Image: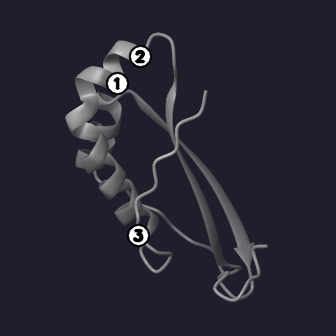
Amino acid sequence: MNWNLESGLDDTHGIEEHIEVLLSVLEPLKDTLSKFAEEYEFCIQCVGYFPASGHGIHFDKSTIKKAANLGLSVDYDFYYIDDNGHDLDYH
């Protein structure tokens, strides 16, 4: 089973902002999610395309606590490209 939820933000927003939006949507569903937590794993999957110079990411304690309280794991797939992916053809 797979359930997808997107932040609705475009790629000009940082990953941290996307995560905050997702957590704000999921927090009111905490009781419902906890009923399924024994049978299913909940994971936020992040994919990012960044310039070859690298990229850092930072989550404050509040964000980490929200994700932990919801029983979420977080997985990151970061790809490094020359033009930050804005002109890539994703077809």
Q: CA distance from mark 2 to mark 3?
A: 27 Å
Residue 64 image point, x, y percent: 33, 43
Q: Residue furthest top?
A: 38
Q: Do labels 1 and 2 touch, CB within 8 Å? A: yes
State which quarter of the image contains the C terminus. bottom right
Among the 4 quarters of the image, the one containing residue 21: bottom left
Q: Is residue 42 left or right of residue 53?
A: left
Residue at the disc numbered 2 = 36
Q: Do labels 1 and 3 touch, CB within 8 Å? A: no
How packed mark 1 is, by other alpha carbons closer than 10 Å (few <14, some 14-19, many 20 or more), is some
Residue 72 image point, x, y percent: 42, 33
Sequence-wise, the earlier of marks 2 and 3 is 3
Residue 67 image point, x, y percent: 34, 38
The label shown at residue 87 is: none
Front-lying residue, 25 or 48 = 25
Q: Is residue 69 left or right of residue 18?
A: left
Residue at the disc numbered 3 = 9
Q: Residue at left 28%, top 47%?
A: 25
Among the 4 quarters of the image, the one containing residue 69: top left
Q: CA distance from mark 1 to mark 3?
A: 23 Å
Q: Is residue 73 left or right of residue 87?
A: left
Among the 4 quarters of the image, the one containing residue 46: bottom right
Label 2: state its secondary structure.
helix
Residue at the disc numbered 1 = 33
- The amino acid at mark 1 is Leu
Sequence-wise, the earlier of marks 1 and 3 is 3
Residue 40 image point, x, y percent: 51, 19
Q: CA distance from mark 1 to mark 2?
A: 5 Å
Is 82 above or below relative to 74? below
